[in-house]
Structures are given as C-alpha cells and as structure tokens.
Image (tube, grey):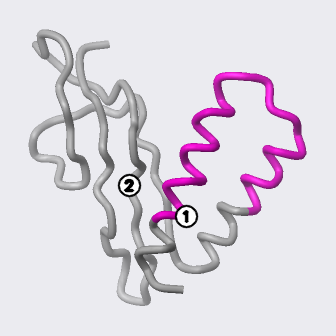
C-alpha cells in the first residue's frame, strides 16, 4: 500500500481512539483499535500523541496553533493529527508533523 494511504489510516485510527476516549467504549472496540495500531506498527509506522507535552517553537515535529494569551510555559492542549514516524534500519524518519493546539494549562 502506498505510504500516503498508511498515513491516512494512521490518522483515522487516531481519530477513532480520540473519539472513544470521551465515552465508555466496549472492550471489543478498544481491542479492534489496538489491533489496527499493531498493524500500523508491523508496517513500520509509529504514532505519537503529544497531548500534554511541553511546547516551544524549536519543536520541528509539530505544527501548532496557539490559543489564549500564550504567556509562560506552553503545553499541547489538543491534538488534531498525531506525529507519524516510519521505522527504518537506520532509525526513524518523520512522515507527518503533529497538528496541535497549544496554550497555557
């Protein structure tokens, strides 16, 4: 499967997981999402959710929109798209920057 389709799949899995985290999903649904994530990992992709992480302008793995006054230490408040890497023999390579909203906690 072409790489851009794998990235689309990773984004869809992330969205499903994000939507299910707000409610009480059945264990079957959670298990299926975990299986999808495992398939992505087997295909050599790694998804990272930077929610809650500190943010500064030097981060090259995020595209951020700032909300509020943005004074002091900033943190990732919401994740629109996850960071996606591909695993290779010589390390990992960034395929998709995370799209996030940052601000003060």
Q: Nearer the viewer, residue 94 or 5?
A: 5
Q: Is residue 28 left or right of residue 66?
A: right
Q: Is residue 3 left or right of residue 38?
A: left
Residue 37 is situated, as x and y percent measured from the top left of the image, at: 65, 61
Nearer mark to the viewer, of 1 and 2: 1
Residue visible at 28% across and 56% down in the picture = 97
Residue visible at 60% across and 53% down in the picture = 13
Q: Is residue 76 left or right of residue 1?
A: left
Residue 6 is situated, as x and y percent measured from the top left of the image, at: 51, 73
Q: Nearer the viewer, residue 86 or 19?
A: 19
Which image quadrant for residue 86? Answer: bottom left
Q: Secondary structure at mark 1?
A: helix
Q: CA distance from mark 1 to mark 2?
A: 13 Å
Quadrant of the rendering where the C terminus is positioned: top left
Residue 87 is situated, as x and y percent measured from the top left of the image, at: 45, 78
Residue visible at 25% across and 27% down in the picture = 102
Using a 10 Å C-alpha cutoff, classify the residue at mark 1 as few (fewer than 14 neighbours), some (14 to 19) or many (20 or more).
some
Which image quadrant for residue 100? Answer: top left
Label 1, on which residue? 9
Residue visible at 43% across and 89% down in the picture = 89
Q: Is residue 29 left or right of residue 80?
A: right
Q: Is residue 95 magenta?
A: no
Query: Of label 1 and label 2, which has the lower sequence position?
Result: 1
Quadrant of the rendering where the N terminus is positioned: bottom right
Q: Are marks 1 and 2 in contact (CB under 8 Å)?
A: no
Main SS type for the magenta part?
helix
The magenta stretch is 8-35
Using a 10 Å C-alpha cutoff, classify the residue at mark 2 as few (fewer than 14 neighbours), some (14 to 19) or many (20 or more).
many
Q: Is residue 31 magenta?
A: yes
Q: Secondary structure at mark 2?
A: strand
Q: Is residue 29 above or below residue 73?
A: below
Label 2, on which residue? 83
């Amino acid at each position: 499967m072409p790489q851009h389709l794998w990235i689309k799949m990773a984004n869809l899995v992330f969205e499903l997981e994000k939507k299910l985290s707000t409610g009480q999903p059945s264990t079957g649904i959670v298990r299926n999402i975990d299986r999808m994530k495992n398939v992505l990992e087997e295909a050599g992709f790694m998804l990272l959710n930077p929610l809650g992480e500190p943010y500064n302008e030097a981060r090259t793995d995020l595209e951020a929109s700032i909300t509020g006054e943005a004074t002091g230490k900033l943190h990732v408040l919401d994740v629109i798209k996850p960071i996606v890497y591909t695993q290779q023999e010589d390390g990992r390579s960034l395929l998709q920057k995370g799209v996030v909203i940052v601000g003060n906690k």
